[in-house]
């Protein structure tokens, strides 16, 4: 007898670590996982934000595991702490990143003013930490018998930016962002092969998410997107639910693009 969709969707008894769990995308991830029955370790650099996020989720469903993902020892310790507090690890989600609004010197600047130091720092958080977390978590995920890794890339890991969208605004699209996100897509493919068959590894590539950007930017973005709107965090919950558990038990090495058709042109 085949299991029902409802049964395949459930994550009861599973434990997850969400890197970047205190952020906007992290909220969607944590809500999706806990709504389906998983317990979640919220990992982020800001300890207070981790505790707040854990407190916002259903009672008993989340713990705070503060971690500086730019530091290898801290990232590896977060995996061990999460497994200890949750009794194992079945799901790893990497949703931490330097983004266009990150305030680091030499980052969100015109290309000629972007610095190698900021580029390196972004790769450390956006890409290298995903490698470190996956490496540390791999034995735990394999032992669970249902291990799933989800890495958050971006449309800008797939296509180059149209800088005309940003004209007349103070917004930026740093080169290091796209480079790191493209690296995550390839890391997904690599890990999917080397961690198989015990662990599945997939990516999610969202399009632009509406978060109070200048109106002219939003209007330009909507005009170019086939679905004529920007994404909402809620749009990512279904993708997370699909890739985290048994709904996608025969899917690995895949990049699920959630972009309103942006990359279809």
Image: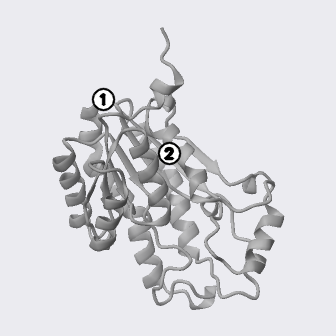
The answer to whether marks 2 and 1 mark residues whose Cβ atoms lie closer than 8 Å is no
- Residue at the limit of the structure toward the top, as seen here: 1
Instruction: Name above or below for residue 228 compared with residue 204.
Output: below
Q: Is mark 1 on a helix, strand or loop?
A: loop
Q: Is mark 2 on a helix, strand or loop?
A: helix
- Residue at the limit of the structure toward the left, as seen here: 84
Instruction: Name above or below for residue 65 compared with residue 36.
Output: below
What is the CA distance from the residue labelled 2 to the residue labelled 1?
Answer: 19 Å
Residue 81 percent location from the top left of the image: 18, 55
Q: Viewed as shown, does residue 2 lie left or right of 210?
A: left
The quarter of the picture where residue 33 lies is top left
Q: Viewed as shown, does residue 240 lie left or right of 216?
A: left
Mark sitting on residue 145: 1
Residue 249 visible in rendering: no
Determine the residue positioned at 55% across, 67% down: 179
Q: Viewed as shown, does residue 77 lie left or right of 159?
A: left
Determine the residue positioned at 48% across, 17% down: 3
Residue 95 percent location from the top left of the image: 44, 59
Q: How crowded is mark 2: few (under 14 residues within 10 Å), some or many (20 or more)?
A: many
Mark sitting on residue 243: none
Circle 2 residue: 240
Q: Viewed as shown, does residue 191 lie left or right of 223?
A: left
Residue 147 percent location from the top left of the image: 35, 36
The quarter of the picture where residue 10 lies is top left
The quarter of the picture where residue 132 lies is bottom left
């Amino acid at each position: 007898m085949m299991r029902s969709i409802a049964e395949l969707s459930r994550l009861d008894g599973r434990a997850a670590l969400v890197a970047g769990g205190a952020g906007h995308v992290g909220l969607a991830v944590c809500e999706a996982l806990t709504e389906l029955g998983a317990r979640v370790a919220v990992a982020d650099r800001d300890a207070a934000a981790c505790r707040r996020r854990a407190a916002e989720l259903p009672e008993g469903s989340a713990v705070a595991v503060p971690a500086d993902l730019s530091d290898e020892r801290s990232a590896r310790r977060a995996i061990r702490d999460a497994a200890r507090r949750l009794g194992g690890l079945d799901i790893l989600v990497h949703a931490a990143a330097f983004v266009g609004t990150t305030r680091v010197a030499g980052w969100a600047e015109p290309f000629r003013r972007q610095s190698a130091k900021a580029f390196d720092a972004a790769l450390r958080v956006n890409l290298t930490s995903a490698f470190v977390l996956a490496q540390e978590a791999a034995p735990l995920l394999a032992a669970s018998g249902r291990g799933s890794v989800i890495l958050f890339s971006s449309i800008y890991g797939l296509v180059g930016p149209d800088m005309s969208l940003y004209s007349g605004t103070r917004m930026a699209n740093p080169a290091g962002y796209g480079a790191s996100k493209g690296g995550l897509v390839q890391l997904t493919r690599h890990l999917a092969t080397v961690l198989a068959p015990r662990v599945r590894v997939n990516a999610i590539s969202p399009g632009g998410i509406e978060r109070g950007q200048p109106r002219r930017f939003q209007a330009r973005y909507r005009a170019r997107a086939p679905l004529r709107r920007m994404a909402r965090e809620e749009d990512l919950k279904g993708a997370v639910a699909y890739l985290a558990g048994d709904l996608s038990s025969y899917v690995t090495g895949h990049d699920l693009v959630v972009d309103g058709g942006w990359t279809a042109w």
